[in-house]
Image: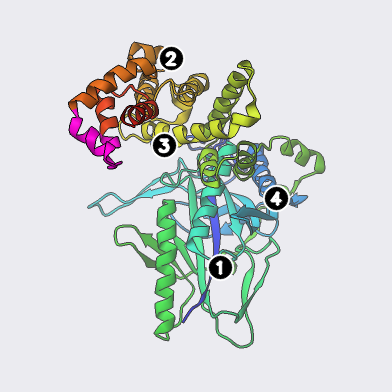
Amino acid sequence: MKYDVIIGLEIHAELKTKSKMFCACDNNADGKEPNTAVCPICLGHPGTLPTPNKRAIEWTILTGLALNCRVNSLSKFDRKNYFYPDLPKNYQLSQYDLPLVYDGYLEIDGVKIKITRIHLEEDTGKLAHPAGKNYSLVDFNRASTPLMEMVTEPVIPDAATAKKFCQTYQQILRYLNISNADMEKGEMRCEANISLQNPGKWQYEPGDGTSGTGGLIKPIGNYKLSSKVELKNINSFRALEKAINYEIKRQEKMLADGKKISQETRGWNENKSETVHQRTKETSADYRYFPDPDIPPLKIDGQWIEGIKALLIELPPAKKKRFQEQYNLSAYDAEILVSDKHLADFTEKVISELRAWIDACGDEWERQKNKLAKITANWLISELFKHLNDKNGGRSIKNIKITPENMAELIALIYQDKINSSAGQQILEVMYERGGDPTDIMQEMGLEQMDNEAELENIIKEILEKNKTQAEEYKGGKIAVLQYLVGQVMAATKGKANPKTVQNIIKKLLS
Ligand SMILES: [Zn+2]
């Protein structure tokens, strides 16, 4: 039996504001002693009053504008009531029926994934359970960190699309510079709601931005629905994809066995690669939401929105399209190059340096840009990435010693055949280690490509003298021997000969 898979996502992201959501405490408690970035407000002492963080509100509206959302002209904060030891107030300040923004979309591979709403709330503290002890510890440094929650409609058809949605969303938050969005550190948490339906036996009813979890999947006729299961505890994109696929298989098997799927929250166990029951999912009625009486409703006028709009920059999906159009890069190359803003900026600076160089030579940029952009993409993606991703010496592109000017010069040396690719790799390694001008490094290391035909011809004649058998074989029609002979010349020149020139000379001498 084949089912329709229906996935909705809820993504929480911690905003990197200076202070917390409702008090002046330091919002960056990384490396601080537990319970030192706290005050009576975020500890929920009686009689304290919360003051909303204006920047966190603006950043949430900014994210909404980036995702084509509508902004509510009136918004408010509500109390979500529940008891848990990491929640000092016994309620979480969140937003219920008037989120800051609603009704947007994010385009993934040409398909618009509808976004129900984005709202702002506060994070909880952190519990620790020391091994072998009969008590737990709580650290409230994280309590009341601004937490932005984005909810999609249940319209995602498979795990791969869900993963790509989360990756693109992370890139956007990083481009906007409002969250580090590191999943391993819990700065971004992706939860997926999954249900399976009989093909054609359901219809989708869009949400209006007010319910907590987006639109509804409604049965047609009296067909019984499979309830949605919520997946939590996912700390990487890879785990998200694996967890969703595991859950689809689990539900398929249950339905095949005639079992009923009940609404529940399941966690992902990375070691066992399976989802496990955590709790029966609460409905929003269980939380007894009501407006927070201490925070007046927020009026968001057009002027304020225009001011926030001015902060919008070109985001990865648009940048990818432009890279493909402007530099004729493949979708694959463009997607990698825009995945990080610093990498995208670096790439554009390198290409603009190359353009300045071509212009200075009095040559035509339009005629050569595609080839130069392709070489640039290759050298960044395959060669520079090797160093950036190296386990020992790897660093972020933001902190590398190679300037765009020097990288462009290296590309120019390769483009002009002044060095071959193995020499280029050696020079890049030195540039990565200590920076510097690639032409200087080339001369210092004696890596300039040998392209002088007369000089090469003498060396090749010697090689052919030493390899008479192979030379005769080639003459007799065994073409494959050519590579062997080129290899001998490359060895004799310590890799500096231009292989194309060598090949031509051998062919000429043996014809
Ligand atoms: Zn505080």
Say which of marks 1 and 4 sits in front: 4
**Foreground of the two, 421 or 219:** 421
Question: Regarding mark 2 in the picture, which secondary structure is present there?
Answer: helix
> Which range of residues does the magenta coloring cover?
467-484
Real-space Cα distance between discs 3 and 1?
A: 52 Å
Q: Which residue is mark 2?
A: 439
Residue at the (37%, 67%) spot, across then down: 276
Q: Residue furthest bottom?
A: 222
Residue 199 appears at what percent x and percent y? 56, 79
Q: Going by the picture, which residue comes out furthest to the right?
A: 302
Q: Give the alpha-carbon distance from disc 1 to disc 2, as whole Å.
A: 69 Å
User: Type of residue at label 4?
Assistant: Asn
Kindly identify which residue carries mark 3. Answer: 382
- Earlier sequence position, callout 2 versus callout 4: 4
Q: Earlier in the sequence, mark 1 or mark 2?
A: 1
Circles 3 and 2: CB atoms closer than 8 Å: no
